[in-house]
Image (spheres, rainbow, N blue to C red):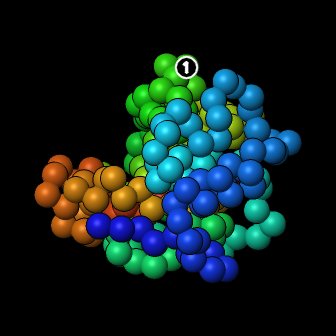
Amino acid sequence: MKCVFLGNQKLHSMKKSALLLIVLFNVSAHAQTFDCAIGGDNTNPKVMAADSLKNRSAIPARYKSMKAADLLNMKVTDETSQHQAVSVKGYILDIKDGGLESCNCHSKTFKDTHIYLVSDESVTDESQAIIVEATPRMRKLLGTTRELKANYLHHNVTVYGYLFCDAEHKQNSTVDDGSGLHWRGTVWEVHPITKIVAE
């Protein structure tokens, strides 16, 4: 099980990537300040690197358009850049608060919002959904979970943000034929999202 970190070149170690990402994404005019490092509260370099990607707050200059169906076909073994900014059209099936996570220093106040994006409104099964996430650092641009539900639940939208491979949920991924409960279509996410536009 792996998600390959690819940018302009492969990083030599997870420890170096964690340090690099913390430096790259630590400063942003769009960030909401709360008492949690960009790398979260886990000391494992691999987890810190992943949490640093989740906590990005820089706004991309351009986005690559992707189809929801293409994203849903991506497996945990696919070698795709997690530094790629994308836009994806779809229908929002559900919006929920996330749990306590290391990326947010296990805060009970500052949590991610999990948005279940499906290809169109005929899809009613979460096992066919792409998980896209609004993070605490993007709240000023996107709003709270309650506001996101009021504005976008059961709407056709285009979401914008960064690709992220959440490999720890391989067992829950339909396309990966995971051994656990399938509550997502793929491990690949748009996380964090930087913008949502209702169609």
Disc 1: which residue: 109
The relative height of residue 39 versus residue 105 in the rendered view (above or below) is below
Tell me what residue is drawn at x 58 percent, y 71 percent. 11
Q: Is residue 47 above or below residue 7?
A: above
| Residue 36 locus on image (x, y percent) | 63, 29
| Residue at the limit of the structure toward the left, as seen here | 179
- Of residues 112 and 68, the one nearer the viewer is 112
Looking at the rendered structure, the number of numbered marks drawn on it comes to 1
From what the image shows, is residue 143 above or below residue 118? above
Instruction: Give the residue type at disc 1.
Output: Thr
Which quadrant, please, contains the C terminus? bottom right
Residue plotted at (76% across, 70% down): 62
Q: Quadrant of the N terminus?
A: bottom left
Q: Nearer the viewer, residue 198 or 177?
A: 177
Is residue 124 in view?
A: no
Is label 1 in a helix, a strand or a loop? Answer: loop
> Which residue is depicted at the point 22% across and 56% down?
171
Count neighbours of disc 1 (C-alpha within 10 A) and say few if under 14, some if 14 to 19, many if 20 or more.
few
- Image coordinates of residue 162 in percent, x first then y, are 61, 61
Is 63 situated left or right of 82 in this image?
right
Q: Where is residue 192? Give x, y as percent.
A: 59, 50
Q: Is residue 29 left or right of residue 3?
A: right
Residue 168 x, y percent position in the rendering: 33, 53
Which residue appears at 24% of the width and 54% of the height? 172
Q: Is residue 41 left or right of residue 129?
A: right
